[in-house]
Image: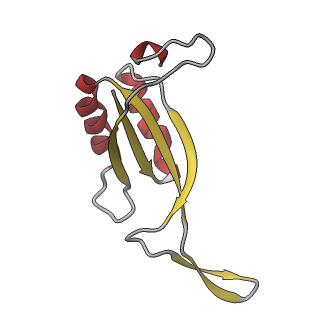
Amino acid sequence: MYKIEITTKHNKIGMLRDAYFKEGITGMTIINVSGQGNQKGKVEIYRGSQITANLMPRIRVEIIAKEEDVERIKDIALKTLASGQVGDGKIVILPVADVIRIRTGQSGYEAI
């Protein structure tokens, strides 16, 4: 099993969810996050003073998947989110040792 973490802009979450639902991928966790990367932050005016917001608000989608589904999940995200602009986001793919459903004690992919 693998965990796919997709971090992108808030305004793209609807498109990504729709693309996944269309392909039958419905199990995901969506989290509000903040981060700093190549975008460097943006300059804003707050109470008459110029400030730089270094942490940019983002959304993270986490999906646990079987190995054979990882490429398809990654490709859907790339096709849906890529605009060629800084800030499109990142995809991180991590191995998962186990998943346990607390209610039943079930483990492995069946626990998802």
Q: Quadrant of residue 31?
A: top right
Task: Locate residue 34 relative to residue 65 in the image: left or right.
Answer: right
Q: Nearer the viewer, residue 66 or 97?
A: 97
Residue 109 at what x, y percent from top left? Answer: 40, 17
Q: At which x and y percent is residue 36?
A: 47, 68
Q: Residue at x 46, y 16 (%)?
A: 107
Please determine whether, in this image, residue 94 is positioned above or below residue 59: above
Residue sitting at x 41%, y 71%: 39
Outermost residue to the bottom: 49
Q: Is residue 2 above or below residue 57?
A: above
Q: Residue at x 23, y 33 (%)?
A: 71
Q: How many marks?
A: 0
Relative to 6, say whether 107 is above or below: above
Q: Quadrant of residue 45?
A: bottom right
Residue 69, given in percent of the width and then of the height, sits at 27, 25
Image quadrant occupied by the N terminus: top left
Which residue is rendered at x = 40% and y = 45% of the image? 6
